[in-house]
Image: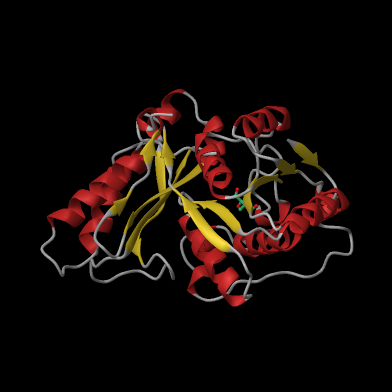
């Protein structure tokens, strides 16, 4: 596995891939990898001749009061995990390489996606995400790019970005991987200990309650009882503070009035200082995408 730390290293490597006409799968990450990332790495490995991961804690997608400084990092461990997953190259640039002092061009997504859910709670977040994702897609020029369903709104933003900028890349979305008790895997779970770790299961329990409420409805019915079912679970957990429990369109994130598929059940809550997100997706065909528990993966 090659470690590429400069833009020139990456460009040289990319030129070699392009000379052979190889398909390239890119998995963009901020490192501190978990089983969710690795399942996407396995997909990139299986579906492309060349599998590439990027590791870059993107400063521009963090707000001034967020956890950029303490975001967990462990490059050596990440490299070993990606090597084990059969990844061919890792691009791990410095912040100065990606954002030189005179950097002044941004990709600014607009519309409901930048006003609701995560966008409402993290102003500027998706500008940072869209800018770095566009840069990575242009630098690596992959055939396919791999993102996790756990960041469902990010997936919607990236889908729009690829369509709006006519980027020649196929978006692949990997499932949420969950701990055995249902907690969605996240690099930020490292912040959770003891009671806080136990309380964090409120998010997946709330989604389960939302799904049960949805399935008890006789269609077409109001989506409000689904939101209420989710809110009630979080309200019963004293250590959890709800940011939102929403039932919305998966592509626009606009709230649904009627409980009709496709739908995204999206939740965000704070457990002390740690902010967590999770979701269930109800596809247009009526099937649920709720992710997989790591102990049930059979790997
Ligand atoms: O999902 C993430 O880890 C980040 O938002 C991404 C896509 C790597 C951009 O920094």
Q: Is residue 1 toward the left or the right of residue 256 in the image?
A: right
Residue at the top extreme?
194
Along the line of sight, the residue nearer the viewer: 185 or 147? 147
Along the line of sight, the residue nearer the viewer: 169 or 293? 169
Q: Position of residue 165 (x, y in %)?
A: 64, 75
Residue at the left extreme?
218
Residue drawn at x 72%, y 42% is: 89
Q: Position of residue 159 (x, y in %)?
A: 53, 66
State how many labels appear: 0
Q: Is residue 62 toward the left or the right of residue 224 in the image?
A: right
Is residue 50 placed above or below 273 in the rendered structure? below
Residue drawn at x 67%, y 28% is: 80
Quarter of the picture containing the N terminus is: top right
Figure colour scheme: secondary structure
Q: Position of residue 245 (x, y in %)?
A: 35, 55
Q: Is residue 226 visible?
A: yes
Residue drawn at x 24%, y 64% is: 223
Quarter of the picture containing the C terminus is: top left
Q: Position of residue 274 (x, y in %)?
A: 52, 39
Q: Is residue 235 visible?
A: no
Residue drawn at x 75%, y 58% is: 18
Is residue 217 placed above or below 44 in the rendered structure? below
Residue at the front extreme?
20
């Amino acid at each position: 596995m090659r470690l590429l730390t400069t833009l020139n290293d990456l460009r040289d490597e990319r030129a070699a891939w392009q000379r052979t006409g190889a398909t390239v799968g890119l998995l963009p990450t901020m490192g501190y990898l978990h089983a969710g990332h690795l399942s996407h790495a396995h997909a990139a490995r299986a579906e492309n001749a060349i599998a590439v991961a990027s590791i870059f804690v993107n400063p521009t997608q963090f707000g001034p009061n967020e956890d950029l400084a303490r975001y967990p990092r462990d490059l050596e461990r990440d490299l070993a995990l990606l090597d084990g997953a059969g990844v061919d190259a890792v691009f791990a640039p410095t912040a100065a390489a990606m954002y030189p002092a005179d950097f002044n061009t941004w990709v600014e997504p607009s519309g409901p996606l930048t006003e609701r859910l995560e966008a409402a709670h993290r102003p500027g977040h998706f500008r940072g995400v869209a800018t770095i994702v566009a840069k990575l897609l242009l630098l690596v020029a992959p055939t396919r790019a791999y993102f996790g369903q756990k960041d469902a709104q990010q997936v919607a933003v990236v889908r729009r970005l690829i369509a709006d900028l006519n980027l020649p890349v196929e978006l692949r979305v990997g499932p949420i991987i969950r701990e055995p008790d249902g907690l969605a895997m996240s690099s930020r779970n490292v912040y959770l200990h003891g009671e806080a770790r136990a309380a964090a299961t409120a998010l997946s329990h709330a989604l389960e309650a939302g799904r049960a409420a949805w399935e008890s409805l006789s269609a077409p019915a109001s989506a409000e009882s689904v939101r209420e079912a989710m809110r009630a679970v979080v309200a019963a957990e004293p250590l959890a503070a709800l940011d939102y429990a929403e039932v919305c369109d998966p592509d626009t994130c606009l709230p649904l009035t009627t409980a009709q598929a496709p739908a995204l059940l999206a939740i965000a809550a704070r457990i002390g200082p740690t902010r967590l997100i999770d979701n269930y997706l109800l596809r247009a065909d009526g099937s649920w995408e709720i992710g997989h528990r790591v102990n049930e993966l059979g790997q």
